[in-house]
Image: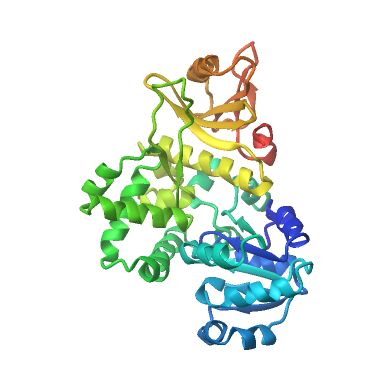
Amino acid sequence: MWIDRQIEPLLLQRAATRPVVVLTGARQTGKTSLMRRLFPDHGFVTLDLPSEAEQAERDPGTFLARHPAPVVIDEVQYAPGLFRHLKAAVDRERDRYGAFLLTGSQPLGLMKSVSDSLAGRAAVIALEPLSFAEAKIAHPRLTADEFVVRGGFPELYENPEIEVEGFYRSYVATYLERDLRQFLQVANLRDFERFLRAAALRSAQLLNRTDLARDTGIAGSTAGAWLSALEASHQLMLLEPWFANRTKTLVKRPKLYVRDPGLAAFLCGVQTVESLRASPLAGALWETFVCAEIRRAQSNRRGGWDFHFWGDRTREADFLLHRAGTFHLADAKWTEHPTARDAGPLREIARVLPPEAVRSLSIFCRTPNPYPLDDAGDAHAVPLDTPAALADWM
């Protein structure tokens, strides 16, 4: 079962205007399937095969002769020596667009090779897991609560019979064994898995590296390196605060989010909708989900907005988008029926910002239908089950 992806028009446009397109992202987000579906006339080779990876690394000239452009090269990070030869091939036919379409699941090494050898020649696109709207098109009865627990990895929707807990257990094991062991030389994978779970329990919270390292029993420098690796490999994201020089009381620490809500729920031990609804972590997991939806919409549409949060000593907005002096403010609430009072902190922040600069105040919640929160109509309760839900934020 194929699920159409909102990023498809962007990928096709980049392939029509650039000689190289690099599609990166976390494992199991559907990079290979998407490339093969959109570009059926391209050749295809995967460097997951050791024999192909070895030839691409040791004898790239022969490898490219065997796999001439236009070609999709899958898991290209396994042959970093290939990139210099790709550069030469591109420079011979600089106007041949879409010649080399590359995928990679390990950005830790991939992006260095791209920046060193293909700068100015390659368009880089990150493929996120499915959005709620994408998954709901394939499964119209899917609820937001179910999506928070199941997450956005396409395989879980292409084959609904897959057992979710088993999928994520295998996913974490594969990530630890294949990605982290190779690039970080983690000596004790059990320590790293404990660190990963501790980070997930802090999703949607201000990052405190010292507390995270102490609670996991590792050095602060190690915690910093592991956080950087998790961020680079699309498992975590750090959302930076918005602040201006004239506002001295705003917080300066970022907020930590697991990038996919299903992975966050699994790492937190929340495995069913019933356990989600009974969990004290429900609010944090819902905010993790909302953050992922905003980020995916931005990535898929190249929204062009700066993505932040607002926090000071007395007020907080979970999410803030800024572009050219204008703002959108939003909170995530684990409720089906937010009230005007829930939008109070957003209104207070709006009064701090320049007059007429705030375009919308939103409470992203579990309501089945959008509605204004008061007679003024300046704040709205917003569901997230359609692409139009985030239209004003793009």
The picture places residue 302, in percent across and down from the top left corner, at 66, 45
Q: Is residue 137 above or below residue 247?
A: below
Q: Where is residue 304 drawn, in percent x and y? A: 65, 40
Which of 186 and 199 lies nearest the eye of the viewer? Answer: 186
Name the image quarter holding the C terminus. top right
Task: Describe residue 386's horizontal placement relative to residue 177 as left or right.
Answer: right
Q: Is residue 109 visible?
A: yes
Residue 227 in picture, x, y percent from top left: 37, 52
* Residue 204 in which image quadrant: top left
**Corner quadrant of residue 156:** bottom right
User: Which residue is painted at 68% across and 87% down in the image?
Assistant: 66
Is 23 drawn above or below residue 266 in the view shown? below
Q: Residue at x 68, y 62 (%)?
A: 2
**The image quarter in which residue 120 lies:** bottom right
Is 217 in front, or is 146? Answer: 217
Q: Position of residue 242 (x, y in %)?
A: 49, 30
Q: Is residue 251 above or below residue 33?
A: above
Is any atom of residue 30 visible in this view? no
